[in-house]
Image: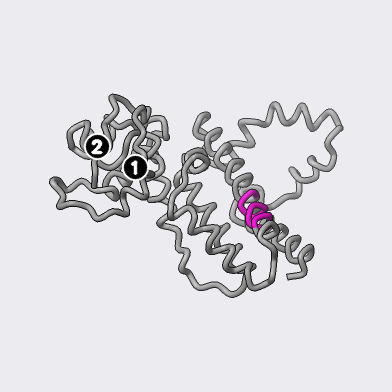
Amino acid sequence: MPAPQAPTGDDDRTKPQTSLWERLARPAPAPRTTLNPHRIAEAAVEIADAEGLDAVTMRRLATALGVAPMAAYRYVSGKDELIELMVDFVYGRLPLDAPTTGWRDTMRTLAVHLRAMNLSHPWTARAAASALSPNQLAVPERAFAALAEHGLDPDTTMAVFRTVTGYVGGSVSAEIALLELQREHGWADGDQTRAGLASRMSWLINTGRYPAYQRYLREATRKDDQDWQFETGLDCVLDGIAARLGI
């Protein structure tokens, strides 16, 4: 594989003319070291999972891999391509070949697995927005193929896909925000979180302006069942799609 010109930092200052994926698809020469794209991605993902995406730098990666600072530049031109490699690595672990029955089962299964992926790797929501990788594209490919048998036009197919993935993104963002709030304050569970917010919430509720929400606080039994909340909402979205499109 031709080596891209190595930049001096993490900013991809000297961009190669071909994409990361085109270069990696070419036959590779005999390796001079045990370093390879899989090892690079795996190490970078471990750093991001533990400390966040901003902690991932080319120098930090080299230290984690035990290689020279410039070694990874044989495969990626800098941090932008490294993030693409990381995103592809994480998406590659989605069980897209799991058997499903019909478009609804396929979309539901994809949504559940995407949620799990994002919760396990919270940085992916931010990173995936600017990445474009083979394993990423495999997700809409799987969804589009499942929807194709219903004769939907391409624009409607994309609208259905984006509606489901948009629901996943919104739900996961709320879950991650709650987890970050709990970590920040040292709250271990929902009970401790509600206790920590009680003084502020009590004043708002006692204004009498939120009777419907007050009923939720008093009567809801699944406040902390995130799986149930997600899957119930997901089924509502899928019900709506089925009713609107007659599929």
In this view of the protein, which residue sits in the foreground, 157 or 188? 157
Q: What residue type is labelled 2?
A: Ala
**Residue 233 located within the stretch drawn in magenta:** no
Region in magenta: 158-166
Q: Residue 193 carries which label?
A: none
* C-beta proximity under 8 Å, tags 1 and 2: yes
Name the residue furthest top: 8
| Residue at horizontal 79 percent and vertical 32 percent from the top | 205
| Residue at horizontal 63 percent and vertical 67 percent from the top | 147
For residue 58, above or below residue 152? above
For residue 170, above or below residue 180? below
Q: In which image quadrant can residue 58 be found?
A: top left
Quadrant of the image containing the C terminus: bottom right
Left or right for 4, reference 191:
left
Q: Which mark is residue 64?
A: 2
Mark 1–mark 2 distance (CA, rounded to whole Å): 10 Å
The answer to whether residue 190 is seen in the rendering is no
